[in-house]
Image (cartoon, helix red, strand yellow):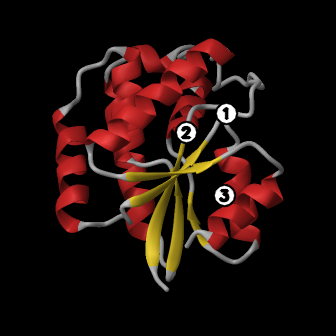
Amino acid sequence: MTGRFILTGAPGAGKTAVVRQLELEDFAVVEEAATDVIALEQAKGVTEPWTDPGFIDRIVALQRQRRLATTGDIQFHDRSAFCTEALATFLGHPLSGLLRTEIEDLKGSGFYQRRVFFVRLMGFIEPTAARRIGLEDARRFEAVHERVYRAHGFELVPVEPGSVVDRAGRIRHSL
C-alpha cells in the first residue's frame, strides 16, 4: 500500500502525539508547520504572529517544503494547506494567492488520499506558548476544519479520543 494521509483537527486534539506514535511504527511523517512558524516569530519578538496576514503564507511555504521533501510509501502529514485555509478562515484573514494556488495544485495533482484522519478533541486543552486557544474556541475551530475539508470533497475518518497508541492503531487499521 502507498499513500499520503492527512491528520487534521483542532489545536490540542493530540494530532502531533499520534503522528509521533506512527513515526515510532516506522511510517514517514511530515511535521506540522504552523507551530514552528509561530515559535520562530516569537523568538524574533513577535508575540502574536497569527495577527499578521503574512503568517498564512509563511505556513504554506514551510508546509510545501516539508511535504515535497518527504519520501516513504505511506506518509502521514500533520496538517496540510487545507488546514491552513481553515486557520485563515478562523482568524478572519483572506485566502492569499499563494494559499489558493497551493490548494489548487494539491487538488489537481491528487497529492493526498481523499480519506483524511480527523483527530477529535480530547475534551481539554493544554496551553503552550504557541497554543493560546481555549476549549470553546478549539471546538469552533474544529468545526471550521470539518467544513473546509468537506467543501474540498474529502472523506473524514473520525479518530475519537483515547490513548495515543489506540488512536494510532485505529488509523493503521483504517488504511
The residue that appears at 43% across and 36% down in the rendered structure is: 146
Please indicate whether residue 146 sits to the left or right of residue 171 in the image: left
Regarding residue 89, the answer to whether it shows in the image is yes
Please indicate whether residue 92 sits to the left or right of residue 118 in the image: left
SS for dot 2: loop
**Number of other residues with Cα within 10 Å of mark 2, as a class: few under 14, some 14 to 19, many 20 or more:** many
Expressed as whole percent of the image width and height from the top left, the position of residue 67 reads 42, 62
Query: Which residue is tagged 1?
Result: 121
Q: Quadrant of the C terminus?
A: bottom right
- Residue 42, located in which quarter of the rendered image? top right
Give the mark nearer the N terminus: 1 vs 2: 2
The amino acid marked with disc number 1 is: Leu
Q: Nearer the viewer, residue 137 or 42?
A: 137
SS for dot 3: helix
**Number of other residues with Cα within 10 Å of mark 3, as a class: few under 14, some 14 to 19, many 20 or more:** many
Expressed as whole percent of the image width and height from the top left, the position of residue 18 reads 71, 54
SS for dot 1: loop
Query: Which residue is tagged 3?
Result: 19
Please identify, in this view, whether the residue under mark 3 or under mark 1 is nearer the observer: 1
Query: Which residue is tagged 2?
Result: 9
Please identify, in this view, whether the residue under mark 2 or under mark 3 is nearer the observer: 2
- Seen in the picture, residue 144 relative to 62 is either above or below; the reply is above
Q: Rounded to the nearest whole Å, what is the CA distance between mark 2 and mark 3?
A: 13 Å
**Number of other residues with Cα within 10 Å of mark 1, as a class: few under 14, some 14 to 19, many 20 or more:** many
Residue furthest bottom in the image:
1
The residue that appears at 42% across and 13% down in the rendered structure is: 51
The amino acid marked with disc number 2 is: Gly
Q: Are marks 1 and 2 in contact (CB under 8 Å)?
A: yes
The residue that appears at 63% across and 74% down in the rendered structure is: 27
